[in-house]
Image (cartoon, rainbow, N blue to C red):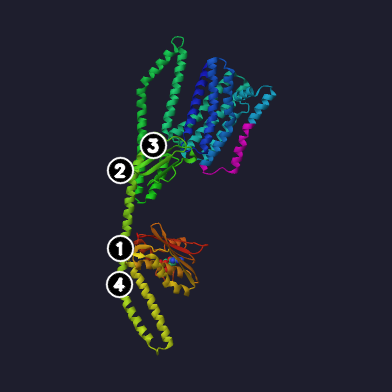
Amino acid sequence: MALLFYVRLIALTAGTLVYLFLLALILGHRRPRRFERLLFLLILSLFAIYAGGLLEVNAVIQYGAPPAATQRFANLLVASGLIFLLPLILHSHVEYMGLVRQKRLGKSSWAAVALVYLLIPAQLIFVAVMSHKFGIRFGPALANFANTDPLGNLAACAVVAALMQFAVFRAERNHRARNLAKLLFSISCLMFAIFMARTLYTEAASSVLSDLMATASVVAGVLPGAVLIYYMLKHNFLDFGAQRNLVYALSATVLALLYLSLVRRVSGWLEPVLPPEATASILLFVLIFLFEPLERAIGPILYRRFRERMSGLQNLTLDLQQEARHGDLARLISHAEQRIREEFGLGAVRISIPRDASQKGLESPGGLGHVVRMPLMKDHQEVGLLEAASTGSYLTGEISAGLEFLAEQLPPMADLCRLIEEKVRLERELADRERLAMLGQMAASVSHNLRNPLSSMKTVLQVQLEKPDLPADLRHDCALVVGEIDRMSAKLKQLLNFAKPLVNGQRVAAVALAKQTAALFRHDAERRNVILEFDGPEDEVSVLASEEALSEVFSNLIVNAIEAQPDGGRVRIGLARSGDHLEIQVEDRGPGVSAELRSRIFQPFFTTKATGTGLGLAIVARRVDEMGGTMSCESPIDGGKGARFRILLPTTLK
Ligand code: ADP
């Protein structure tokens, strides 16, 4: 029947193009996972089946009986597609179920999938056995396998597909994906019915009916592909909708191919009356008149697409500006990297502000993608770098333009962020200063009110102590009270010192001062069984400070280190020149400072000691800051024990 033959021709052409279109679409996917790769192989099998069929039908049109080599090639295509179809249908659906359930495949699913792959060698063995049995060569046996599908492979495929799609339908929560599963399930059921009918009617040998069934199965086979394309483009199934450029390019190519084949065919039909070249020229010329309506049809689509992209970019910029207002540059950069990656479906994005010349260039994940680097410019100067890498496909012009736009927006955003960061810092500093000033006033008034009575009390007691006839027990008590008064005076002095700035920019010989301060504590250390070690450079090192401030730094650290080892131990005071800095280390073998405490010990009034003021380290931190230095605490330093306080102070030029 000529009509059925032409219907088959059209369906085979449509199927080949549909599956080719899908192949290209999947190849260009921005983030192919294992499922997309499996889908690619599945579509490749279907493409092979349709392409083989199309080749055969075209050969029939051209030559009547196709040449042996063409026939063999067409059969090989169909057979190879057919052999891989069932395992790939099962595997891709199982993988998809894993995505839906957000679970990795269990051992039993893997075993089932692996078992079904055994069908591939099993089918080949079947063909080999049949060829041996009927005394024919392997090639013709394979051709027969491709044409007659003796194992009912296609019907099995339809059943497996229907069952799996039913399972997907039940598991899926997204209503679009559910609808797709429902549609594919119906198509698979329809195909199963057609394949079964085809097998039955082939038996009955009614050539028209079997021809009809064969045609119906070819037509129905196009449907899954067409439905998949529709859902991918219309509903962005599996994130395919994002690649509009690719879709436009593919559609244009497919249309051009179809038009060219139409030109060829019409030229063939008109050959008796018109030379083929003339027909081709006329048909190509007619195309010119199609441009205007085509442009009118495409214009609004492109405009809508452009608006969508622009509003996406605007939202992204607004979001980043909002983030910049938090005044945290590192947070802005990591947020921008993540948002840009999501917006453009990229594999990796890195923003470096300022640009780090020693850093290795960004590489795409797996090294497969395409990387672009855009300098971030401000006042004609490069202030940073934006790097973006795709996962596999080429970065389209649309994405590059979007990235360029963002590269222009990022430097002012970083400036805004820094400005706010600075403002917040200044505000905090001001608040700190105000607090300290108040504390200073309070400390001054407390010490003023307490120091005088204390010193009067001390004088009275000292006078008593000088009396030779003072009873021994009273003498002992008086001495005790004098000691306590001294301790209280020292604490009051500490409170006063904390509140007032002490560094006045003198040149201080740090090594000599450290040695001198350490010597003051030698006696105290020996009493507590602590060995005091001093380790300093031969030459003197000067820093800009004040003697009082620097000695406060040393003494507070040494006191803490000694107090940390009530049962004896070792304290090392080390000084060394490090470039244009003086490095001071005070370390001990005490219990150390836990990570949790480390963030709090520099706060004023934080103490873990029963009689502590919690001001020692706060004073050290304040003085170091006034001297333009930095300070840190490491712990443990030695076998899970000890603490090391390290200070870096800028040195003065000799
Ligand atoms: P205070 O000595 O009055 O407690 P500091 O500000 O000098 O005040 O110290 C705060 C806290 O830091 C201490 O209470 C102690 O818990 C901890 N600390 C300081 N130096 C050391 C050290 N060398 N080893 C262990 N803990 C320390």
Task: Say what amino acid the circle numbered 3 marks.
Answer: Ser
Indicate whether residue 113 is drawn in magenta: yes
Q: Residues within 10 Å of mark 2 (few under 14, many from 20)?
A: few
**Magenta portion: prevailing SS class:** helix
Checking the image for residue 434, the label placed there is 1
Circles 3 and 4, Cβ within 8 Å, touching? The answer is no
Q: Secondary structure at mark 4?
A: helix
Residue 315 visible, this orientation: no
Q: Secondary structure at mark 2?
A: loop
Taking the image as four quarters, which one is ligand 1 found in?
A: bottom left
Q: Residues within 10 Å of mark 1 (few under 14, many from 20)?
A: few
Quadrant location, the C terminus: bottom left
Compared with 494, 283 (above or below) is above
Checking the image for residue 379, the label placed there is 2
| Residue 430 picture location, percent across and down | 30, 60
Checking the image for residue 445, the label placed there is 4
**Earlier-in-chain disc, 3 versus 2:** 2
**Earlier-in-chain disc, 1 versus 3:** 3
**Earlier-in-chain disc, 1 versus 4:** 1
**Earlier-in-chain disc, 2 versus 1:** 2
The alpha-carbon separation of the residues under discs 1 and 4 comes to 17 Å
Q: Secondary structure at mark 3?
A: helix
Task: Say what amino acid the circle numbered 4 marks.
Answer: Ser
Q: Is residue 263 left or right of residue 498?
A: right
Q: Secondary structure at mark 1?
A: helix
Q: Which residues are magenta?
A: 100-121
- Residue tagged 3: 400
**Earlier-in-chain disc, 3 versus 4:** 3
* Front-most of residues 283 and 465: 465
Q: Among all residues in the image, which is located at the extreme top?
A: 273
Quadrant location, the N terminus: top right
